[in-house]
Image (cartoon, coloured by chain):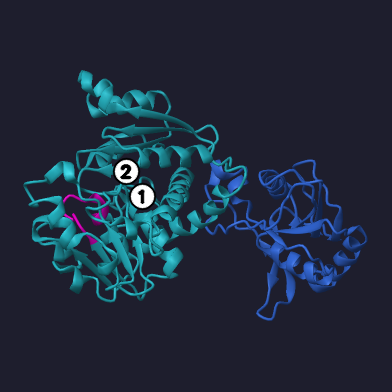
Amino acid sequence: MHLPDAEQLLADLAEKIRPDVTKNTVLVGIYTGGVWLAERLHQILELTLPLGALDVSFYRDDFGQIGLHPQVKPSNIPFEVEGRHIILIDDVLYTGRTIRAATNELFDYGRPASIRLAALVDRGGRELPIAANYVGATIVLLEDKMLALEQSNNGKLSLSLYDKIPPG
Amino acid sequence: MNNNPQLNKNGELQHLLTTEGLPASILLNILDTAESFVGVTARDIKKVPLLRGKSIFNLFFEPSTRTRTTFEIAAKRLSADVVNLNIAASSQSKGETLLDTVNNLSAMHADMFVVRHSQSGAAHLIARHVRPEIHVINAGDGRHAHPTQALLDMFTIRRYKRNFRNLRVAIVGDILHSRVARSQIHALTTLGVPEVRIIAPKTLLPAKVERLGVHVYHDMAQGLKDVDVLLMLRLQNERMLGACLPSSEEYFKHYGLTQEKLALAKQDSIVLHPGPMNRGIEIDSAVADGKQSVILPQVTFGIAVRMAVMTILAGN
């Protein structure tokens, strides 16, 4: 299957976000791919407020089934959340469960003025009433496929498609 | 199958009973996870929903304020329901056995027991006895082990010294009665600290302690030379004055950590103490409150480390 160029999608996404950026806008990336994208968008959009990063492991709804994810990274929100316009950045939007977790985590830092969602790829398959405000591309994929954003040593982003390992 | 009672059949942590015999990967996973919880405990809302609906019983058969409180805070910050049982003052004094107490609490659908007991092996006994979905954390058993204290010490050391590979660490004081020292020695050697020293008078050392891979010193001036980390121990006054030591003044003169003695260690060395401190006996106030002391950060990190242990256990 032909996958779009992640670098081109990133450039498109930045231009879709740009008209909505205000002095009070902050970007928050979701680990791991979303943080890479947020770092790049932060540069492209020349934002002055610092960047946030979320690891949603402590807010996931599948902890009871699969336990803690093995590589938890510290979340880092180096600004007051109260009253900010937050744009959440994720690489692949799928079930919506990660976004639910990220939203809940943000509210434990304060009450933002608004939260919007930007995703590089929307692959459908939502299990919650969640939609992105900015999307790089929409790709329809079968359930047994996994779409992942990867970063090469020189920082270049690309998309790869994998077969999901069946459970057990 | 393995025969380590702390691990399940997949080699994951089922109970935390001692640092002895745990692989470095499990210790490091606890420390790494705790890094993420440090951020949580610094927020306005210091709570995550991980253990919502779980019941954690603090079973303290021996008095403790700090350890019990930090376990309680850790559990509450994970959104668990916590019940504190001060058993020295309850059923046990009416003759109920340890396992009957545990059976009764299991029937109340406990998910986790945090156990402090004056008898070595008490937490092991409970861990062998409970149903497989229940997890046990040893919060100190007799002279045997106090694994969460050792882990929070390792976390503190890594925070200030970055890694364990080039460190000289000295454990100072009452090694004989100390479950903390035993757990520290196992953790330090597993994590690859090349030189672990213990400094104590002969009467406060267990027999054949060298077998644990430590270097023994009886003199502070020699033992502290070029040391990066000083792990002070509490002199357990209540257990031994008269029998092991002539007097606490005599002890302070030879083994109490003063600024003069600390100056023998490296300039950037750090001082840890598990608390509660006996000021003027094992540590001078000028050191305890000095700039090389990381004793209060230890307490803060202790909550994050206990959150990490509870979360990892509950997830396995």
Q: Look at the image and say whether residue B176 sits in the magenta stretch.
A: yes
Q: Chain of mark 2?
A: B
Q: Nearer the viewer, residue A44 or A31?
A: A44
From the rendered image, report the letter of the chain displayed in blue. A
- Tell me if A130 is positioned left or right of B160 in this view: right
Q: Chain of mark 1?
A: B
Q: Which disc, if any, is residue B65?
A: none
Mark 2 neighbour density, 10 Å: few (under 14) some (14–19) many (20 or more): many
Q: Nearer the viewer, residue B197 or A141?
A: B197
Residue drawn at (60%, 44%), measured in percent from left and top?
A62
Q: Nearer the viewer, residue A92 or A40?
A: A40
Q: Colour of chain B?
A: cyan
Residue drawn at (18%, 57%), measured in percent from left and top?
B252
B92 up-or-down from A93: above or below: above
Secondary structure at badge 1 equals: helix
Residue range in magenta is: B172-182
Mark 1 neighbour density, 10 Å: few (under 14) some (14–19) many (20 or more): many
Residue position marked by numbered label 1 in the rendering: B148
* Mark 2 vs 1, N-terminal side: 2
Q: How many marks?
A: 2
Q: Which disc, if any, is residue B138?
A: 2
C-alpha gap between disc 2 and disc 1: 8 Å
Amino acid type, mark 1: Thr
